[in-house]
Structures are given as structure tokens and as C-alpha cells.
Image: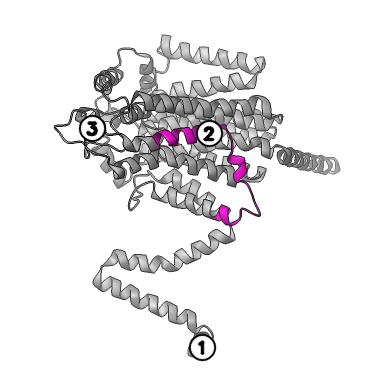
Amino acid sequence: MANSISNYTSENRGRVLLLFLLFLLAMYELITAGLPNFAIICLLPLIVVYIYITFKWRMFTFWTLIVVNYFLQMKDIHVPGPMSLPDELLELILLAIAIIDSEQDPHFARAGNLMLLAVMIWCGFCTLEVFNDSCNLGINISAWFTGFRLLAIQLVWILLVFSIYISSPQILMTYLKLWALLAVFSAFWTYKQEYWGMTAAEKLWMETRGRTTHIINGGTLIRYFSTFSDAANYGCNAAASAVAFIIFGITNRLRKGKVFFLIVALIVIWGMFQSGTRTGIFCLAAGLMTYIFLSKSVKIAVPFTILFAIAGFLLVFTTIGNGNQQIRRMRSAFNKNDASANVRDINQEAIKKYIKDAPWGIGMGMSPENVPANNKFRKLSTIPPDSEYVFIWVHTGPIGITVFVCCMVLMLFGGCIVVLFKLRNKTLIGIGAGLCGAFVAIQLGGYANQVLYQYPNGLTFFGGMAIVYILPYLEPEWDEYEKKRISQIEEKKQLRLEKKRKI
């Protein structure tokens, strides 16, 4: 044993010396600065390994981004520093790798589309917001940059990353299946919260910040939030995701793909109902109606319309299912006298009075911490916005919300053009229509709740829209991929038939 250690040391003197120096540094940090710095030093070798893996298998970082983004707001996960930091670091690493590999894989050109134009217009407006001094407090670069980073620049990273790294049919299918599995895990976690109990961190949140909005009807109804920040975020995400999975399942040419995505959709819809998010019903309906338009098919439009009509009739005009509290809560979405809806209307009326004097809004990144108590627009900074659109309206004014809506419509319009006129493969048309439907659904969710930029929605649904624009580039390769998969399935069927005949 002693000889083997001695031989290793003599052969790897540099590595041994480096490890010994790291050990001494770790001990020094533990004694002088405490456990956090000690932990950072101990993690340095892992960081080196991660960098090696990143450059060896570049898709590893992309899949890491998708998974990390999905669980950022889970109550038991605590991110040191800004919550956006892991996403932004991984996206910048991916873009750095893409720049290094640009000669071999020049995929940056695929990002030149209407979505990029819409994003650039929005980023341009948000850049001008740096000069917004409606509150008469001087230009606050720090506050502006915080808002700019979260509302605008992250859309650039998302568009570029998805345009570059979704580069083959195999990667596209892997992404869609990974998304489906993550959504199923969220539904499983909802089941776990409901029937097996919550973790200590989840219980603490429910008893403090979430108590008034998630324990309702005198404590008899609990709104479950799964791996998300809150029930509204989870419900809208589940509704938009279910739209995509339903359409993927209907349009998939492979039987296994149909069964997989349709089962996932049913599981995710169950989770949506457990969230008690009433907006989810409208998100689901809006997304599927988008598909009816994009399908250009009477055979699809008629049954879907009948299904919507029956579901709407049952919810609005009957009491079927009222024994289930979650269904009763969903039914209250159609009640014009609902208390929570009235509170939102009151808040928005108050905002209208103040926003008249701030056509550019109170400023990006401005919050109660930035606006003093004696300021004219203090009230605007403290009123709960209730929705992403109202939040943007408050911070960028009537001008800003108009620009934002136009940019979102432009993104969607470009995606619909791709689906309607630039694709021929039915499965790809289904994928494009599903992603457009999901985009519409989450936009409606953002109109009613502050969920559009919440994790994991930004990456998932703006990334999905970016995928729609690159589908024409993938179509020739997709045709070959699909033919190969169908022929493989046919060969397996023939082999099974031959075995049965021999028996």
C-alpha cells in the first residue's frame, strides 16, 4: 500500500502538490472565514470537472439548464444570490460555447426571424426606460438594470440558446419528452403534498406567506403549488403545458408518442385542478382554440368545439361535481361577483388614477424599497399588481404595455405563419401548433396572474416559441427521422407476426 502511494506521488507530483495546496487553503478558510468559504474551496475540483464535461459534451449544459430552471422555485431549494443567477450563468456558458464552435455549427443565423425583431423592439424600449424619472428621484441605474435583465435581456438569451441548441430531430424529441417528464414530476409532487404531506419548508411557507391565498374556505380547501412558487404559477403552467401535450399526442404519427403525450396531458390537467387556479380553465381553452385555428381542419374544429361547449355548459349552468371543492373553486371563475375578482378590479381602478401622470410608468425595477413614503407614486409601487401585464403597465406605463403587447402579438403572428405556411410535415405542424397554443395559454395566464416571467415559465414558453421558428430548418431531417422510426416499428411488427406464425 505504501509503495503504491509512493509510486502515484512520484508519477503525479503536480497533481498531488495542487491537491495539497487546495487542502491547506481549505483549512485556512475554515479557520479564518468559516464553513461557507471552506465549502467553496472544496467545490473547486467539481467546478473544474463540470467545465471539462461542458466542453466535452456541450448538450450536457443545455439539459442542465432545462432541469435547473424547472426547480428554481421549489421551496426546499435555496439559491444563493438572485434567483435568476443559475439560469443566466448557464445561458451565458452555452452562448460562449456556441461562439467558440461557430465555425463548425453556424446556427446563429437561425435566430434571425420575427421573434428576434419583437425581442429587439422590446429591449430597445426597455433601454430607453433608463431615462425614466417619473418619481423625481434621479436616474437609478441599479434598479433599472434589475428590471431590464428580468423583463427584456433574458428573452434574448432564451431565443439564442433554443435557436442554436435545438439542432436536430433527436434533440427536439428529447427536449419535449424531458419537458413532459418534468411536468409529470410536478403532478406527482402535488399528489405527494396532498396525500403524503408537505416538507418542512413547504409547511412554513403555507403557514406564513401562503396562508391567506392557499388555505381558503375556512381552511377546508388547500391550493397545492407543487414545485412552483405558488398555486397560480403552477396552475397556469400546467394548463399551458397540457395544451402542448394534448396537441403533440393528437398529431404524433407514432402510436407510442400519441399514448405517451396524451397520458402526460391527463396527469398534468389533474395537477392543474389541484392548484385551484381558476384561470387555468381559460388558459386551457384558449390554447386549444389556437390549435383549432392553426389546424385548418373541420374534422378537428367540430369535435373540439362540441367538447368546449359541453364543458362550459357543465361548469356554468350545472352543479355537477360540486362535491369536489377544487371543481367548485374552478366553477367560481364564471361568477361575476367573486370577491377576489372584485379586489383586482378595485386595485386596477386605483392604478388608473395614478398612471395618468406617468405615461412611461414609475420606472423599471422601482419598488417600495426605492420609492419613499412621501412620493406621489408611492401608492403605485405598493399596490399588488396581481398580473404580469398589470406589473408591466405600472412600471413602464401605457406606452410600455402597448409596446409589450405589440411585441407578443408579433412573436405569435410569426409563429402562426410558420405553422400555417412553412411546414408540410403533419407531426411538425402539430409540434408548432402545440407550442403556439401553449404560448397563447401562458400569455392569458400572465394577463390574470403574475406568472409570465416566473420560473420555469419564461424559458419553457418563450423557448417553445423560439423552437417554432426553427422547425422549417429541421423539417428535411425530420422527414428522414420519422420515416426511419416508422420503418423500425413496422419491422418489429413483422418479426412478431413471423414468430406467432411459427408458434
State the residue position of label 1: 10
Badge 3 crowding class, 10 Å Cα cut-off, few under 14, some 14 to 19, many 20 or more, is some
Q: Which residues are magenta?
A: 97-126
Identify whether 295 is placed above or below 35.
above
Give the farthest residue toward the top.
Answer: 317
Q: Is 349 on the left-hand or right-hand side of 237?
A: left
- Secondary element type, mark 1: helix
- Residue 152 appears at what percent x and percent y? 42, 38
Q: Secondary structure at mark 2?
A: helix
Which image quadrant is residue 251 in?
A: top right
Q: Are marks 1 and 3 in contact (CB under 8 Å)?
A: no
Residue at screen point 65% across, 29% down = 429
Point 35% across, 51% down: residue? 79
Mark 1 residue type: Ser
Residue 117 disc label:
2
Between marks 1 and 2, how big is the CA–CA gap?
Answer: 60 Å
Q: Is 161 included in the stretch rendered in magenta?
A: no
Q: Picture coordinates of residue 247 (x, y %)?
A: 59, 28
The mark tally for this picture is 3
Rounded to the nearest whole Å, what is the CA distance between mark 3 and mark 2? 31 Å
Colour scheme of the rendered structure: one colour
- Judge by depth and name the residue closer to the eye, 46 or 353: 353
Residue nearest the viewer, comparing 11 with 207: 11
Residue on which the image places disc 3:
135
Q: Secondary structure at mark 3?
A: loop
Query: Tag 3: residue type?
Result: Cys
User: Label 1: how many residues lie within 10 Å, few (<14), some (14-19) or many (20+)?
Assistant: few
| Residue 392 in view in this figure | yes
